[in-house]
Image (cartoon, helix red, strand yellow):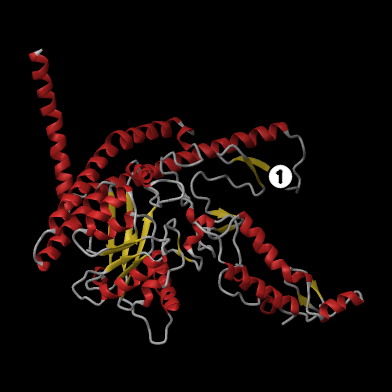
Amino acid sequence: MGGLQAAWSIMSMVTLTPFFAFLFTIVFMASIGKSFGVRRLYVDLLVKIFEFGRQNIESVRKQQFANITKSDAEEEDTPTGDSLSTETIDTGDGTGRANTNGNIPNGGSHRYMNGRDNSSHIANGGNTVISRAESLILSPEVIDDTRSKHAEPHEDGSGAVRDNGEDGDDETKSDGTEGEQEAAGFKLSNCLDYVKSGMEAIIEDQVTSRFLAEELKNWNLLTRTNRQYEFISWRLTVIWMIGFLIRYFILMPMRVLICFIGVVYCVIGFAFVGILPTFRLRRAMNDIVFKHTFRMITRSISGVVRFHNPEYKPKTCGFCVANHTTPIDIAILSTDCTYSLIGQRHGGFLGVLQRALARASPHIWFERAEAKDRILVAKRLKEHVTDPNNPPILIFPEGTCINNTSVMQFKKGSFEVGGVIYPVAIKYDPRFGDAFWNSSRYSMMQYLFLMMTSWAIVCDVWYLPPMERNEGESAIDFANRVKRVIADQGGLVDLVWDGQLKRSKPKKEWKEKQQEKFSKLLKGE
């Protein structure tokens, strides 16, 4: 019995001691913001593996397509002539689609479709099923009368081009009834734009797709997809199984331990900072503990962050305004700068962090549904920005998480207070892990589990030049100007829609604006 205990002690010393030494090294390097470069090498290796997987998928797809073509040629005995042959292609999701141009399906990025390069910017951005004309998108803003702008005469002057694509002479009347309709200003074609927009919204609207996971051009060896690429060839099956073991049995336990250490450090550290007697010492220690905490939390998800334009980093009181994809945005930005935070009061894991942070520095937590809280928040914001000793407030004006493809409507509250606005653009690389938090589908713990089992969280952060509200500029116009700058820098789509449509129905005022516009068309105004 004593021999077994001795053997166990030796084994524990041999295995656990190096492990904890390695874990301590990671935590220490994370807390001081340094790295040996292992994560970047790890990310570069993943890119090469993803590229190998893409090439493997494409080669298998080409072979499958060749086999289908060969079997169709043997079964069909009809002459080809000048007729267009239709071939069925396996799309990988159990369905088939017709291929009328003879292109070989690509297992990775479908770059060329319909004879044009789809890698260029799509009008509505993102991965869309349909491409709408921007002038026909119904939005909260009052749209212009596009029909009067689009009507142009033929080159030969013989007639006008109607908006529905048919040629004809609008002056020609078939009977007296049609003439009366024309005199009253009514045309049946007036409603076609609305019918078209309605059908497009049923197929795919601009808002709903912003709350779904961003689609990938190439498979990243994760099973969070409808395409079962892991079983398309034995090579990918082996790579996927090895990756599964690494992510769930090596990376995840270490990440959980690092995150746990970071949270414990946060609770103890901020409790200690909160009892310090002098304001100057408390502020200096808060800056240290704040950055150490979020650096450890970011390291627990293998975060690789690239900061650009550090000369524009927030330095004094004001507002740091950023687009919002995930609660991890706070940890990403806080690794480089100390902020006061503002946001909805949460329970659970986020609640623990919120209560710990509030002990050491001024943060603002509110209840979204209570109107009294909004009034108090506006008052506290004004008090905060007037004190030059306070750190800048980190705020996400969208009010909800968007899926890393777009920037939605900025709430005007923080732009009415005054003070300097420091815009920040955040863009995540979706190849290594989907950072978007769909709060209507996943709880915080489920989301953290997905983050812990992803390959890594890689993102770019751009600090942008400070902005101030111009004289005579409304808060809404100022918010839209800041939003446009962030969208342009991050390569995101600038949308006018309110992100709260994720939880609520469109406002009655929006419907009334469209009804008023359509009634004017019917009256011929």
| Relative vertical location of residue 216 with respect to residue 465 in this rendering, above or below | above
| Relative vertical location of residue 13 with respect to residue 425 in this rendering, above or below | above
**Residue 492, quarter of picture:** bottom left
Q: Nearer the viewer, residue 278 or 370?
A: 370
Question: Residue at left 32%, top 47%?
Answer: 348
Q: Position of residue 353 (x, y in %)?
A: 26, 52
Mark 1 — residue? 85
Residue 516 is left or right of residue 381, and the answer is right
Q: Is residue 32 visible?
A: no
Q: Position of residue 102 (x, y in %)?
A: 63, 46
Q: Nearer the viewer, residue 326 or 246?
A: 326
Question: Residue at left 68%, top 35%?
Answer: 72
Helix, strand or loop status at disc 1:
loop
Disc 1 packing (10 Å; few <14; some 14–19; many ≥20):
few
Residue farthest to the right, as pictured: 175
Residue farthest to the front, as pictured: 372
Q: Position of residue 140 (x, y in %)?
A: 56, 70
Q: Is residue 382 visible?
A: yes
| Relative vertical location of residue 301 with respect to residue 163 in this rendering, above or below | above
**Residue 286, quarter of picture:** bottom left
